[in-house]
Image (cartoon, helix red, strand yellow):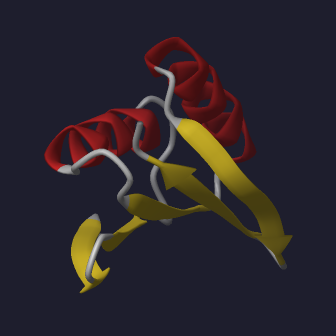
Amino acid sequence: MTMKFEKVSEASYKLDVLGYVCPHPQIYTKKALEKLQSGDLLEVLYDNPSSGESISMMCENTGDEIVEKKQVDSKYILHIKKI
């Protein structure tokens, strides 16, 4: 179980926190967003349902926009636009 943060393309990043439980996915998401420029897109992969709620609330507080939320089998995917 290793957290992975990588640049996918220009202004697009991916954070894989599969296997982590709260509060780690939220902490890693916050740190990843701090590295991004305004307008960049972050894809977050996680498998702990409560992490989605924590990340969503964090984004409401910071003003970052959740563009898309989806579930594929037991994995969850969030696309967050850095504001």
Q: How many marks?
A: 0
Nearer-the-camera pick, 1 or 16:
16
Between 13 and 25, the one nearer to me in the picture:
13
What quarter of the picture does the C terminus occupy?
A: top left
Q: Using the image as rendered, state which of residue 13 and residue 26 is in the foreground.
A: 13
Q: Give the residue drawn at x 43%, y 44%.
A: 25
Q: Is residue 17 visible?
A: no
- Give the residue furthest to the left: 35
Q: In this rendering, is residue 41 above or below 51?
A: below
- Res 59 quadrant in image: top right
Whole-percent x, y for residue 20 in the image: 45, 52
Where residue 41 appears, as percent x and y from the top left, is 43, 62
Residue located at (33% from left, 71% from top):
13
| The N terminus lies in quadrant | bottom left
Image quadrant where residue 15 sits: bottom left
Report x, y in % for residue 23: 44, 29
Report the residue that reaches farthest toward the bottom: 9
- Would residue 62 appear left or right of 70 to someone viewing this image? left
In the depicted structure, whether residue 73 falls above or below residue 35? below
Q: Residue furthest front?
A: 39
Q: Is residue 59 left or right of residue 53?
A: left
Of 62 and 6, which appears nearest the observer? 62
User: Which residue is the extreme one toward the top?
Assistant: 61
> Image height check: is 40 above or below 73?
above
Can residue 43 be seen in this snapshot?
A: yes
Residue at (30, 70) in percent of width and height: 11
